[in-house]
C-alpha cells in the first residue's frame, strides 16, 4: 500500500512527500464536522494526530452595505452571510487592516467599522 493521509476512516488522500518530516495534502470536499487524521505508509495507521481536524461549513457572502465610505473611517459596514457558524470568529479587511466582527442578528450578520486612514480600494470580508 502507498503512503496515505486519512481524514476519518473512509477518506484517504495521497500526500505530496516533501521530506521525512513534511507531507502536503489537498483536502477533499467533506461534510462539516470533526475527523481524526492518520498517516499510513502500509495500509495501517502508523501515526494519529492527538486532536481532530474540523471541517467547517462554507460561508457564503450574501451582501454588504454600504459599499463605500470616507477615507477618514468610521463607516459601519454590515455583512450578511449564509452558513456563518460563528461570525465572532470572522474579520473584515479594509486594505490590510483586519477588523473583528461584532455579531448583530442571529449569527447571520456581522458588523464591521472601517478604521481611519485606510487607503481606498477593495475590502475583503
Image (cartoon, grey):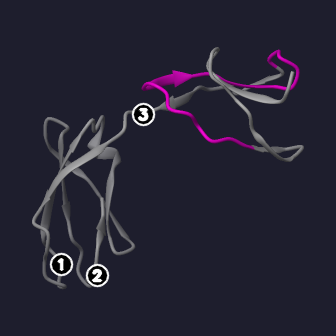
Question: Mark 2 packing: few (<14 Cα in 10 Å), some, or many (20+)?
Answer: some
> Would you say 116 lies left or right of 38 here?
left
Question: Mark 3 packing: few (<14 Cα in 10 Å), some, or many (20+)?
Answer: some
Residue that badge 2 annotates: 118
> Would you say 107 lies left or right of 98 here?
left
Quadrant showing the C terminus:
bottom left
Q: Residue at x 26, y 53 (%)?
A: 101
Q: Is residue 115 above or below residue 44?
A: below
What is the secondary structure assignment of the residue under circle 2? loop
Who comes first in sequence, dot 3 or dot 2? 3
Q: Is residue 98 magenta?
A: no
> Would you say 19 lies left or right of 101 here?
right
Q: Residue at x 29, y 84 (%)?
A: 119
Q: Are marks 2 and 1 in contact (CB under 8 Å)?
A: yes
Quadrant showing the N terminus:
top right
Who comes first in sequence, dot 3 or dot 1? 3
Residue that badge 3 annotates: 56
The answer to which quarter of the image holds residue 14 is: top right
What is the secondary structure assignment of the residue under circle 1? loop
Who comes first in sequence, dot 2 or dot 1? 1
Q: CA distance from mark 3 to mark 2?
A: 31 Å
The answer to which quarter of the image holds residue 76 is: bottom left
The x and y percentages for residue 23 are 77, 43
Q: Is residue 121 above or below residue 11?
A: below
| Magenta stretch secondary structure, dominant | loop
Q: CA distance from mark 3 to mark 1?
A: 32 Å
Residue that badge 1 annotates: 73
Q: Is residue 20 above or below residue 91?
A: above
Q: Which residues are magenta?
A: 24-45
Q: CA distance from mark 2 to mark 1?
A: 7 Å
Amino acid at each position: 500500500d502507498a503512503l496515505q493521509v486519512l481524514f476519518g476512516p473512509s477518506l484517504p488522500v495521497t500526500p505530496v512527500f516533501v521530506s521525512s518530516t513534511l507531507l502536503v495534502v489537498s483536502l477533499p470536499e467533506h461534510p462539516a464536522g470533526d475527523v481524526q487524521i492518520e498517516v499510513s505508509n502500509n495500509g495501517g495507521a502508523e501515526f494519529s494526530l492527538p486532536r481532530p481536524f474540523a471541517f467547517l461549513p462554507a460561508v457564503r457572502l450574501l451582501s454588504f452595505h454600504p459599499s463605500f465610505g470616507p477615507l477618514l473611517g468610521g463607516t459601519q459596514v454590515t455583512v450578511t452571510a449564509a452558513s456563518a457558524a460563528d461570525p465572532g470568529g470572522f474579520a473584515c479587511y479594509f486594505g490590510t487592516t483586519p477588523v473583528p466582527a461584532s455579531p448583530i442578528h442571529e449569527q447571520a450578520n456581522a458588523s464591521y467599522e472601517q478604521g481611519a486612514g485606510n487607503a481606498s480600494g477593495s475590502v475583503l470580508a
